[in-house]
């Protein structure tokens, strides 16, 4: 039989409470018994002190123990009288047995100064028997010998009833405590595991593909943080599912356009509507190159997501690398009437892959070249910052709305108003750039540029090794 966590938690709590209640009950009973024995012993000491007082006074008055030897009933009467006074019981209730104390075992006897028995039944001469000296004018005139009462043997019916009631009350309290602990444990187990049950139900829904499920979190403890983590996981899965669907739709759309052009061109050639001229073949080649570039970008992005892109990390002067890339693009920017400016100083080293960094900078410059209106401006800056090197690429209008800047690194995302498909590109270049920057331990963000366009800010950690 399999038990749930609710039952196990309930069982653990209630067992702990029962053990604690029984231990407390046992401790209370033990403490009461010890305390009650001490109470009886103190009362016995009080009785003996009163008895010694009376006997010493009688010895002075009678001049010896003669009368006590001759009258044992007087001894018993004295014992009963002193016991009632010590107990503060007052006169006996009507109907009480006159010889109640006779039923008690004899525990006290009077001895003379030589130790001979004067009155009282003989007591065993063992280690339990105790002697109390009777002194008159600093002289020992006799002895009281007593045997301590056995533990928990009381000489008074009221004391006995009190003892029994206290012991009974102790176990009744223990029983009620166990019952209360059971009810409270059941309530606590249900309350503590309510968030777990909610998370369990939500997990089952998530496993069935319902990524919209969320868990209501009402606490800030470990279970509350677990619910928050579950909600973040559900949100991530929901967002990834939406991105997957969007990507499939975008990829199919991107593939459909060049394929439709190729199909139309080929059918026109087959039907004899167009001649296989150099211009026609160039158009076909252009569409094939677009398809090839899209497929290569998708493949490279998949490798980057899987962490399978190869990187040869070595110390690189980032300023020198940027200068080389700018030299390659300067003529193309001039043809588009876009002024290309570089602001940097040599000697800014970082640990990186020169090929991947060239690809990163090339993708960003291709975007600026493709989307910046002519006449326009583009500016690159390489500068040192605290514990890093910062690379900034910005251009003139058109820009990207602030609400969309955080999305431009998503796969196949493009701002249709200013960066439409008519300029080419599949919207994968910046997604690849982001993966390259992250692989170098850096960060990349898109901001608004003072030139009117987009400002790409990349920060890389510096390399502290020796440079040649």
Image: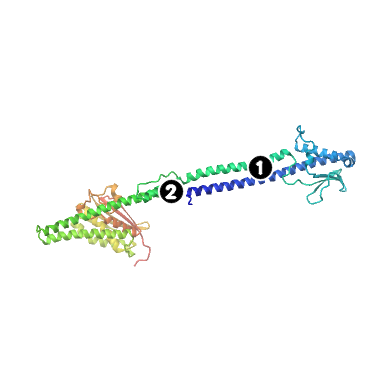
Q: Return the x and y of residue 149 as percentages of the image width and height.
A: 76, 45
- How far is disc 1 from disc 2 in space, using C-alphas? 49 Å
**Which tag, 1 or 2, sits closer to the chain's start?**
1
Q: Evaluate whether residue 375 shows in this view.
A: no
- Using residue 241 as the reference point, say whether residue 111 is left or right of it: right
* Residue at image coords 72%, 46%: 151
Q: Return the x and y of residue 84 as percentages of the image width and height.
A: 77, 37
Q: Which residue is mark 2?
A: 225
Disc 2 element:
helix
Q: How many marks?
A: 2
Q: Are marks 1 and 2 in contact (CB under 8 Å)?
A: no
Q: Which residue is mark 1?
A: 167
Nearer the camera: disc 1 or disc 2 = 1
Q: Is the C terminus in the top left, top right, bottom left or bottom right quadrant?
A: bottom left
Q: Residues within 10 Å of mark 1 (few under 14, many from 20)?
A: some
Q: Evaluate whether residue 188 shows in this view.
A: yes
């Amino acid at each position: 039989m399999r038990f749930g966590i609710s039952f196990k938690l309930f069982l653990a709590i209630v067992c702990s409470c029962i053990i604690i209640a029984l231990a407390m009950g046992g401790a209370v009973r033990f403490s009461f018994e010890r305390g009650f024995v001490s109470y009886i012993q103190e009362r016995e000491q009080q009785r003996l002190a009163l008895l010694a007082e009376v006997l010493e006074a009688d010895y002075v008055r009678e001049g010896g123990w003669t009368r006590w030897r001759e009258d044992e009933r007087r001894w018993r009467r004295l014992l009963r009288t002193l016991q009632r006074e010590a107990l503060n019981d007052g006169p006996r209730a009507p109907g009480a047995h006159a010889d109640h104390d006779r039923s008690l075992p004899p525990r006290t006897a009077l001895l003379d100064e030589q130790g001979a028995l004067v009155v009282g039944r003989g007591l065993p001469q063992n280690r339990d028997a105790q002697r109390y000296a009777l002194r008159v004018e600093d002289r020992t005139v006799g002895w009281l010998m007593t045997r301590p009462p056995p533990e928990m043997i009381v000489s008074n019916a009221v004391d006995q009833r009190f003892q029994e009631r206290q012991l009974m009350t102790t176990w009744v309290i223990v029983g009620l405590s166990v019952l209360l602990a059971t009810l409270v444990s059941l309530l606590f187990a249900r309350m503590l595991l309510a968030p777990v049950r909610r998370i369990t139900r939500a997990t089952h829904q998530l496993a069935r593909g319902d990524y919209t499920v969320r868990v209501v979190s009402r606490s800030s403890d470990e279970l509350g943080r677990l619910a928050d983590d579950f909600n973040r996981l559900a949100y991530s899965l929901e967002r990834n599912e939406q991105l997957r669907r969007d990507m499939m739709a975008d990829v199919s759309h991107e593939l459909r356009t060049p394929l439709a052009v190729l199909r139309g061109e080929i059918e026109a050639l087959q039907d004899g509507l167009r001649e296989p001229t150099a211009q026609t073949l160039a158009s076909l080649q252009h569409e094939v190159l677009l398809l090839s570039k899209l497929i290569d970008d998708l493949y490279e992005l998949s490798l980057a997501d899987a962490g399978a892109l190869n990187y040869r990390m070595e110390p690189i002067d980032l300023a020198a690398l940027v200068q080389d890339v700018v030299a390659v693009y300067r003529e193309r920017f001039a043809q588009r009437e876009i002024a290309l400016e570089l602001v940097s100083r040599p000697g800014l080293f970082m640990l990186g892959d020169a090929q991947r960094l060239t690809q990163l900078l090339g993708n960003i410059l291709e975007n600026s070249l493709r989307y910046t209106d002519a006449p326009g401006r583009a500016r690159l800056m390489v500068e040192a910052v605290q514990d890093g090197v910062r690379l900034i690429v910005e251009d003139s209008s058109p820009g990207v709305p602030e609400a969309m800047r955080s999305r431009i690194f998503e796969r196949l995302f493009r701002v249709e108003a200013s960066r439409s498909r008519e300029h080419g590109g599949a919207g994968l270049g910046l997604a690849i750039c982001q993966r390259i920057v992250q692989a170098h331990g850096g960060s990349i963000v898109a901001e608004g540029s003072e030139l009117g366009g987009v400002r790409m800010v990349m920060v890389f950690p510096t390399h502290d090794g020796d440079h040649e």
